[in-house]
Amino acid sequence: MRRTIAVVTTSRADYGHLYWVLRDLEAHPDVDLKLIVLAAHLSPEFGATVGEIERDGFPIASRIECLLSSDSDVGMAKTLGLAILGLTDALAQMRPDLLLLIADRYEMLAPASVALTLRIPVAHIEGGEISEGAIDDAVRNALTKMAHIHFTSTDLARARVISMGEESWRVHRTGAPSLDHIRRSTLLTRAELEKALELSLADDVTVVAYHPVTIFRHTTAEADAVFAALESLSGQIIFCYPNADAGSHELMARIQTFCATRLDAHLFINLASITYWSLLREASVLMGNSSSGIMEAASFGLPVVNVGMRQQGRERDPNILDAEATVESIRAQVDRSRQPAFRESLRSMKNIYGDGHAAERIVGVLTSIPLEGLLHKRAQPLPAELRPS
């Protein structure tokens, strides 16, 4: 029987990860794809990236306005509430057979909560990972317990999901779907990239992807060190917009001020996925605290200076150079990233997050797993060492 599968996307980041999963679902003869778009996608402040989805030709089943133009944790909480209200109407009308969610953005708590009350089975991508410096870590674990099918990026992540009491048959190691872009998409040549950016790239390009650290009460507490280190950095600097979290407006203002004082610094509110991956291929180093440094940069052998605690706990490839949130530590790791011997050591590296075949594995499971009884999750026996004596 044909299955109705709803997929939620909230921002440019998760859409880039979901692209090939959406393509394969759309092409499958037994799937009726329902794409739900909300939050930053519909915000002009964050580039109104719903336009990218439309240009890619995906039909949008529902658009849900919920993102407040705010820079506080209260705004985040209210955004979550608005998302729940909008998603309740959308999902009650659709009644999909499955709802697919990805990763760990706080907005994803809304569709998972609504699906739970409406008895819609949830499939979740990228559970079992760790990012101790963000509320994302708690969100990811909550989504795991509300989900009924799991697609993990690594074997260790799969083991973590099973250790949380999930039945092993529900947990599939597929790899990270963002890596499918590198295998299946045609990345831009350097000349095409320069045309897309409307910018001549220098020989030394530092890409900066830095986001608020949402576990902190002051979410931009580490930013002083980042900007101070950048001021002393030579070469061209290209900033990507921060996530729509508390503190993002402050970071935007600081980036704009920085770019106003340096002719070789540039800010892009939104980069299409292909443009972003192509930029990483041409860059000298990626600096910041983005998961793209952890998960995707390894596929290009790109050195990453990972700053502070946002990504603390994630599995790492050898291209990751962890820096404390101090000017001295950041500069030391940037200097190390430029050493020819270090760059040469990354040439034969394999990305632990996957091989670029995640979408076909995910879609294979979504279209074949029996739906009967899927909502009934059975508790797993406690390990012997945890049982009361």
Image: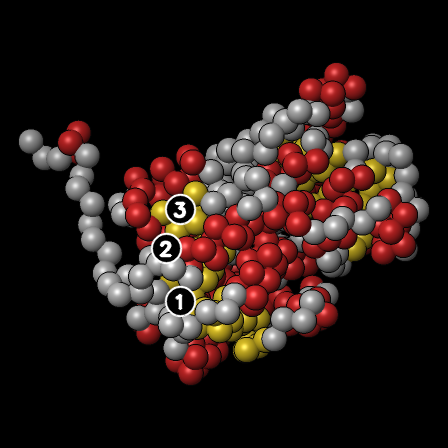
Q: Residues within 10 Å of mark 2 (few under 14, many from 20)?
A: many
Residue 212 image point, x, y percent? 61, 49
Residue under the image location 36 percent in, 37 percent down: 159
User: Can you identify the residue that label 3 sits on?
Assistant: 172
Instruction: Look at the image and tell me in which quarter the N terminus lies.
Output: bottom left
Residue drawn at x 77%, y 20% is: 339
Residue 243 on image: x %, y %:
63, 55
Amino acid type of the residue that numbered disc 2 sits on in the rendered structure = Ile
Residue 98, disc? 1
Identify residue type, mark 3: His
Asked if the residue under mark 3 is in contact with the one under mark 2, i.e. CB atoms within 8 Å, the reply is: yes
Among all residues in the image, which is located at the extreme top?
Answer: 341
Question: Which element type, helix, strand or loop, lies under badge 1?
Answer: strand
- Pick whichever, 388 or 319, lies toward us: 319
Which badge, 2 or 3, comes first in the chain's sequence?
Answer: 2
Q: Which residue is mark 2?
A: 149
**Whole-Å distance between the Cαs marked 2 and 3?**
8 Å
Asked whether the viewer can see residue 284, the reply is yes
Q: Quadrant of the C terminus?
A: top left
Query: Label 3's element?
Result: strand
The residue lying at 54 percent from left, 39 percent from top is 354
